[in-house]
Image (tube, helix red, strand yellow):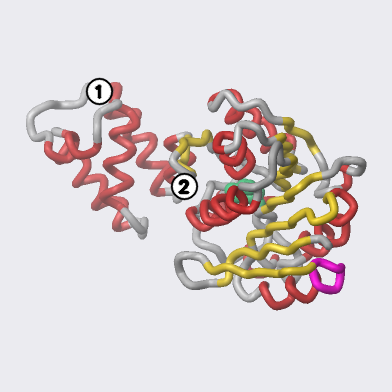
Amino acid sequence: MTPRELIRLTAQQFRNSGIPDPENDAALLLAHLTGRPVLELRLDTDTHPDPAVLSAYQVLAEKRMNRIPLQYLLGEAPFCSRLFKVDSRVLIPRPETELLCEWALDVIRDIPVPRVLDLCCGSGCIGLTVKADRPDACVTLSDLSEDALNVTAVNAVRLSLDVSVCRSDLLDGLSGSSFDLIVSNPPYIPSSVCDHLQPEVMKEPRLALDGGPDGCSLYRRIIEKAPSVLVPGGKLMLEIGFNEAECLSALLAQKGFRHIEIRKDYSGIERMILAVLP
Ligand code: GLN
């Protein structure tokens, strides 16, 4: 079977399994195994992949039909024009989070040698992007999950970035530090919703998704402690879930934060919030 036929046949199977982007996934998995560009494979009606490639491809296709996320099968995901290693130990970086990261870089633009904390770092995509774009920054990345931190550390090495990685239950393990900016994409999906997500999302770590009964449990703990680890005038920036902006603005204002600003994502949903400590 030629690559073109193989991709078509597999895409048909993916479509029957309800996979959202069947052609793309079928082609990318073959590209991953052969090291050949997607377009070339799609047009290739001459060659015949060798049996080892075919059987490896069958294994990956089977996993994909069991709704393992494509990025876990490829072993990496793009974020702010860099590739990050990902597997089932970490959340897959999302395009919305790129907006958060760009905003974070904007906020520290005029601060020389900014001290930045990426809280709930997962793959490390936010903190490592900040460090890559601002080599003078002192970046700390923390997460509760030891498993996730191992992935963060691998990504730091892969990107040759010198950052501190530490295990902490939110801000509990960070007392005594002081940051110019805390940026965080913590788990924020209400627990009841976590049981009914898209099959692929249910393969991601529950710990990275579940934000407690109303989705805001972690934000409450973060906002409570943040003033003690921020410099005066320090900023807290959070990615937020659907309909959470109002509740969070109130919480932040109550804790003394000022200049609260909310921004939307590509779908027009209020997705991130920035607040400044007086
Ligand atoms: N900071 C990581 C990301 O944005 C992980 C977020 C998480 O685990 N909730 O993808």
Q: How many marks?
A: 2
- Compare residues 46 and 94 and report the one nearer the observer: 94
- Compare residues 270 and 120 and report the one nearer the observer: 270
Residue sitting at x 45%, y 65%: 266
- The amino acid pointed to by label 1 is Pro
Using the image, tell me which numbered label, if any, was put on residue 51: 1
Residue sitting at x 60%, y 37%: 134
Q: Nearer the viewer, mark 1 or mark 2?
A: 2
In the depicted structure, whether residue 9 falls above or below residue 15: above
Residue that numbered label 2 is attached to = 69
Q: Is residue 221 left or right of residue 137?
A: right
Q: Quadrant of the C terminus?
A: bottom right
Crowding at label 2, few (<14), some or many (≥20) Cα neighbours within 10 Å?
Answer: many
Point out residue 38 in the picture as x, y percentages from the top left corner.
Answer: 24, 38
Disc 1 residue: CB within 8 Å of ligand 1: no
Residue sitting at x 46%, y 37%: 82
- Compare residues 100 and 188 and report the one nearer the observer: 100
On whether residue 225 falls in the magenta region, the answer is no
Q: Which residues are magenta?
A: 252-257
Asked whether the viewer can see residue 89, the reply is no
Dividing the picture into quarters, in which one does residue 100 lie? bottom right
- The amino acid pointed to by label 2 is Pro
Point out residue 132 in the picture as x, y percentages from the top left corner.
Answer: 56, 34
Q: CA distance from mark 1 to mark 2?
A: 25 Å
Asked whether the viewer can see residue 144, the reply is yes
Q: Is residue 153 left or right of residue 175?
A: left
SS at mark 1 in the image: helix
Point out residue 240 in the picture as x, y percentages from the top left corner.
Answer: 64, 64
SS at mark 2 in the image: loop
